[in-house]
Amino acid sequence: MSLVLSGISVTRGVAIGKAVILHHEQPEIGEHTIPRPLLQEEITRYRAAHRKARQQLRDIRKRIPADTPGDITAFMDAHLLMLDDGVLSEAPVKIMRARQCNAEWALKLQRDTLVRVFEEMDDPYLRTRRDDVDHVVNRILRNLQGRYDPGHDGRAGQLRGAVLIAGDVSPAETLLMHQQGIAAVVTEYGGPNSHTAILARSLGLPAVVGVHHLRRYLRSGEALVVDAENGMVLAGADAGELAYYRLRQREERRHVAELNKLRERPAVTRDGHVVALMANVELPEEASAAHRLGAAGVGLLRTEMLFLNRETLPEEDEQYEAYLRVVRAMKGAPVTIRTLDLGADKCLGKEPRTPAASNPALGLRAIRWCLKDPGMFSPQVRAILRVSAHGPVRMLVPMLSGAGEMLQVLRLIAEEKKALEREGVRFDPSLPVGGMIEVPAAALAADTLARHLDFFSIGTNDLIQYTLAVDRLDEEVNYLYDPLHPAILRLIQLTIRAGRRAGIPVAMCGEMAGDPDYTRLLLGLGLREFSMVPATLLEVKRVINESRLDTLERDVRRMMRSRSSARIPALIDDLNRRR
C-alpha cells in the first residue's frame, strides 16, 4: 500500500529514486568559562574553524561549472561574504574576550543576535535570509566540534539518482549533491522563499518542502516518487503508479525544451498586445541570469542586503557601485531600484534607534523610517540618481500609505537633484519615481497618488497580509492567506484603473505576478507589466503568448461581477483551461 506525504510545492517536475536520509545533529551548546591564560588558545581554535569554513566554501565554489547561472553561484558568494564580514570573523572573538567563554557559546550568542534581526523583518523573502546565518554558523560549528560535513561525506556513489530527505539543507550541500546527481530534494522545513526552494527552482530540481515529520515515516533506500508540482512524496508506488509518473517525466522534459525556445521571443498575446516581463533581483549576478532568460528589465531591485550585517551604514559610493553593476548587467534594459525597506527595530549592527515596536509590521518601517532619518536616506537617493546617468533607472518607494509621504519624498529628491547639479554630477533629471501599492490605504487612494507618481508597482505579498490581517509564515493562520480573496482582487483592479486613468504604467512585483495560474486573471484585470523571480519568467511568458486579451478582459469583468466569492477559484480554473 502506498504512503503519500504532502508538503509545499516549490518547483515542477517528477523524480523517481531511492531515499537518502540526511541527518544534521544539533548538540546542545553550553557556556564554559575559559581560564584567562588559555583564552588565546580558544580564540586560535575559533579562527582555525572559521578559516576551514571559508576554505570549504571556496572549494565548493571552484567546483561550480563556469556556465552555471549567476543566481546559483550568488548563494555561495553571499555565504563567503558573510564569513569575511566582521560579524562572524571578529564579533565572536570579542564575545569570547568579554565573557571569557568557549568559542561555541560565543558563536551561538552572535548567531542569536543576527537571527533576531532577520526574524523581525516584514518582507517574507528577507526574513528567510536568516537561513544564511544558520548555514554559515553551522559550518563553523561543525568544524569546531569536529563533526562531518554533509557535503563532503564521501558517499557520492549513493547520491546519483537518489531523493535527498532532510530537515533542511544548505545551499552548499544542495549544490554539491546536485553535482553528484541527486534527482530531487524533500525537506521537513522551509517555504516558498527558503533557500532550498529558490535554489531548486534555479537548478530545475524537483523539490517539496515543509513535509512535517518526514524522516519518521521513511527509511534510507526506500523507493520514492516525488511529484513536485503537486507537493507530494509517494512511497511504495505500485507498477501502475510508476508507469504514470514515468509518463509525466517524459512530458516534463518536452515541456522544458519548449520553454527554452521562448527565451528570445517577446511576450505578446495572440491578439498582438505586448506585455513587459521583468525580474525581481537582489544581486548583480541575478540580473545577468535574468538578462539571459530574456527579461525586459529589472522590475524590483531589493537594496536591503547592502545595509545588513555590518557595523556602519553603506556610503553613497558603495551603493552607487552596487546599483551600477546591476544596470550594466541589464545592458540597456530598465532597472527599478526600490529604496530601503526595513523596520526601525533592526539595529543594522548598531544600537536600535527606537524601542522595539510592539507590532513591527505596522511600525516605523520602509519609507516611514527613511523619512525619519534623512541622513540614512539621502545617500541612497543620491546613489540612485547618479546611477541613472548610466542607463534607464526608475526609483520605487515602498510602503506608501498617503500622498503626504510621497510629497516629502519628492521634495527630498528635488533637493538632492539641485545638490548634484551644483556639484556637476550627471544624472537623469527625468528619473521616474514610482510607489509600491502594498497597503490597502494606498490602493484605495491610488487615484490621488497617481497625480504625483510616474508609475505604480503592486506588492501583493504585503497587500494580502495587510488586507486580510494574516501572516502567511504563521502556520496557525496562513490558511487565510488567499490571493483570490475578493477584497484583494478589487484592490488590484482599483490600482490598475487609477493608473490607467492617470496615464501611468502599473506593474506587479509580488508573488502573484510570477505564478502562471494567475497570469490570465491579471491580464484580464488590465496588468501589462509583470516582475517575478527569474525562474518563472518563461512559464509566465508561455501563458501570455497563448492568451487573447479581448476574451480575457470580457471573462474577468464577468467574474468580478460574480456575487459568489466561493466560485472565483473555479472561474479562474476555467479561464486557464481556455485559450
Image (cartoon, helix red, strand yellow):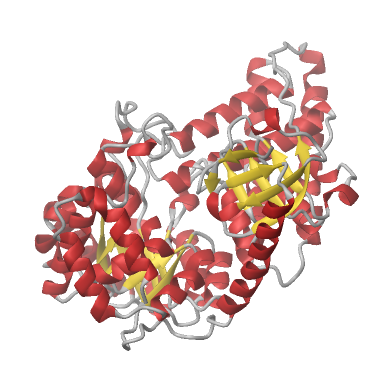
Q: In the figure, 389 relative to 299: above or below? A: below
**Can you tell which quarter of the image residue 496 is in?**
bottom left
Picture residue at 60% right of the left edge, 43% below the top: 132
Q: How many badges with numbers are in the image?
A: 0
Relative image position of residue 99 (x, y in whole percent): 64, 16
Quadrant of the drawing holding the C terminus: bottom left
> Looking at this view, is 103 or 191 the one in front?
191
> Looking at this view, is 70 or 21 the one in front?
21
> Looking at this view, is 419 or 430 the one in front?
430
Work out whether residue 233 can be spotted: yes
Picture residue at 37% right of the left edge, 41% below the top: 122
Relative image position of residue 373 (x, y in whole percent): 29, 45
Picture residue at 76% right of the left edge, 37% below the top: 22
Relative image position of residue 341 (x, y in whole percent): 36, 49
Q: In the figure, 225 relative to 288: above or below? A: above
Picture residue at 22% right of the left edge, 67% below the top: 556
Relative image position of residue 1 (x, y in whole percent): 69, 37
**Can you tell which quarter of the image residue 41 is in?**
top right
Q: In the figure, 541 relative to 134: above or below? A: below
